[in-house]
Image: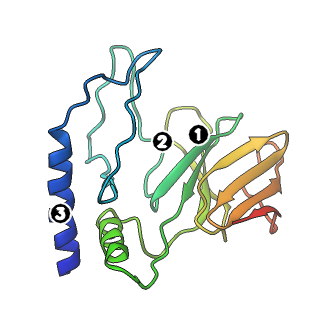
Amino acid sequence: MDLVAQLTAVVGGTIAALRRLTVPRVQAVGATPEIPAARRQGIMTLKMPSAVGWRVGQRPETAPGLAVNALASGLDHPRWIEVLPNGDVLVAEAKEQPSRPKTLLDRATQATMRRAHAIGDSANRITLWRDADRDGVAEIREVFLDGQNQPFGMALVDGTFYVGNTDGISAFAYQDGATRLTGPGRKLVDF
């Protein structure tokens, strides 16, 4: 770990600890929450969780009568999930593409993202998981759509599959039950 990454961790941890000392006077919960006014911050807040998978044999606790299963595993930095009407589960897998940092803040941001494994070579794909026998474990794993640019948001509307990438939104024709989309799609918006 380089010095900037260590400094980022120390400064970030200190700021987080100091912020925990200031408890809001009114909790923003319920049907009509009282949202506190925004406060100006001297240093930006970058909360980057480090995702950790379940250990072998580990499962979350559930309410009586319910069970939890790992539908899928071996994902490369999953960012978003979309469940299609037929029960297929789509997962957008992508990481931030590293660039040469220009400022100290850029270096700190990249160090934080590196710690969370959120930066580096990116899968840039959407993977389809199908649980054909409905036992809670996907038997089918297919690359649904690849060659994307950091895909995130997805939506299926009236036979059109929309993908929100870092550089724009594209639309693809979708047939019910398809396990793969082909072709470049139709670019709707460039970012």
**Residue at image point 32% right, 50% down:** 53
Q: Are marks 1 and 2 in contact (CB under 8 Å)?
A: yes
Left or right: 57, with 155 as reference point: left
Left or right: 117, with 75 as reference point: left
What is the count of numbered marks? 3
**What amino acid is at disc 3?**
Val
Question: Residue 66, how many percent across, how many down?
Answer: 39, 19
- The residue tagged 3 is 11
Mark 2 vs mark 3: give the one in front.
3
Give how far apart the Cα atoms at labels 1 and 2 are. 8 Å
Question: Residue 14, how many percent across, how many down?
Answer: 14, 55
Above or below, 35 relative to 176: above
Left or right: 2, with 150 as reference point: left
Task: From the viewer's side, name the closer residue of 26 and 108.
Answer: 26
Q: Can you see residue 1?
A: no
- The residue tagged 2 is 71
